């Protein structure tokens, strides 16, 4: 069977604190041949976060230099910090036929959609309610009250965009949400537009 010519992109967005990182950690064991896109950010690392694993943590000046050099597939200002996706590792992973997973905000999703729509599948993740989101942000214990308030304000605006996405996951029970995310990751790999039409058809005709 002929494989996909290129890899695919799975974009995950949702309010900070809804459980995106927790869910991703839960599903990696069930997804084949993926590459998680490590974003670059100017925000300070949280306790436990590792440079080059969770993010590439850089200064505002370094980030702005990368913008000038056209290094980003997309970037945006979120909660007063820059966040961006570097182009090079993404192209490499796509050429290797990988499923490239992005955890980016709604602005980044729109930019990537406009640039390479045919490769993209997207999922919006949220909590059952705003109250649950507040509880999770508080219990995560990583951010100050001011930062949490900013994230909650941002969350109210972000949820308005959920219908721009292909799928919606309400992360209530973690295992249920994880199963849904694995299904979406698998479906992402078999979208018709990812296949090389000429090869598929000629192979089908000659066998
Ligand atoms: P995000 O990556 O979206 O900012 P996190 O993965 O850091 O969110 O999760 C925020 C907090 O919510 C963490 O303390 C995490 O343990 C908790 N959490 C995540 N998913 C669930 C869930 N389904 N039920 C209860 N708590 C959860
Ligand atoms: P956090 O600071 O909680 O890790 O992330 C804050 C927000 O920034 C989340 O909504 C996350 O999806 C988003 N984000 C992380 N990396 C990127 C990126 O490279 N580009 C964009 N546009 N958003 C990102």
Image: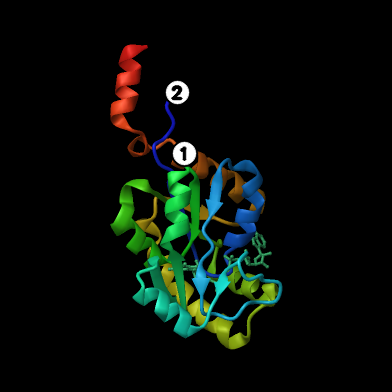
Is the CB atom of the residue marked by disc 1 within 8 angstroms of ligand 2's nearest atom? no
Q: Secondary structure at mark 1?
A: helix
Circle 2/circle 1 CB separation < 8 Å: no
Classify residue 132 by image quadrant: bottom right
Image-based side of 113 in relation to 83, left or right:
left
Which sits earlier in the primary sequence, circle 2 or circle 1? 2
Q: Is residue 71 above or below residue 196?
A: below
Inspect this view and state whether residue 173 appears. Answer: no
Give coordinates of residue 26: x percent, y percent: 66, 51
Inspect this view and state whether residue 54 appears. Answer: yes
Q: In the picture, which quadrant includes the N terminus?
A: top left
Q: Which residue is mark 2?
A: 1
Q: Secondary structure at mark 2?
A: loop
Image-based side of 88 in relation to 33, left or right:
left
Q: Residue furthest front?
A: 69
Classify residue 69 by image quadrant: bottom left
Q: Is residue 137 above or below residue 114?
A: below
Write the residue at 67% across / 77% down.
Answer: 142
| Eye-nearest disc, 2 or 1 | 2
Q: Is residue 53 above or below residue 175?
A: below
Name the mark on residue 187. Answer: 1
Write the residue at 37% across / 75% down.
Answer: 67
Q: In the picture, which quadrant includes the C terminus?
A: top left
Q: Residue furthest top?
A: 207
């Amino acid at each position: 069977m002929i494989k996909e010519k290129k890899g695919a992109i799975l974009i995950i967005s949702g309010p900070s604190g809804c459980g995106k990182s927790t869910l991703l950690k839960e599903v990696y064991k069930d997804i084949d041949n993926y590459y998680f896109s490590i974003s670059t950010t100017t925000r300070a690392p949280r306790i436990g976060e590792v440079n080059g694993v969770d993010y590439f943590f850089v200064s505002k000046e370094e980030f702005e230099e990368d913008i000038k050099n056209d290094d980003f597939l997309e970037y945006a200002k979120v909660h007063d910090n820059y966040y961006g996706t570097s182009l090079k590792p993404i192209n490499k992973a796509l050429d290797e036929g990988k499923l490239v997973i992005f955890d980016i905000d709604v602005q980044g999703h729109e930019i990537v959609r406009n640039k390479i729509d045919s490769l993209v599948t997207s999922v919006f993740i949220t909590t059952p309610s705003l109250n649950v989101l507040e509880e999770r942000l508080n219990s995560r214990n990583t951010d100050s009250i001011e930062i949490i308030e900013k994230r909650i304000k941002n969350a109210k605006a972000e949820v308005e965009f959920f219908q721009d996405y292909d799928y919606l996951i309400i992360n209530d029970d973690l295992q249920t949400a994880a199963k849904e995310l694995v299904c979406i990751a698998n479906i992402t790999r078999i979208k018709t537009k990812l296949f090389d039409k000429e090869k598929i058809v000629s192979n089908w005709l000659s066998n």
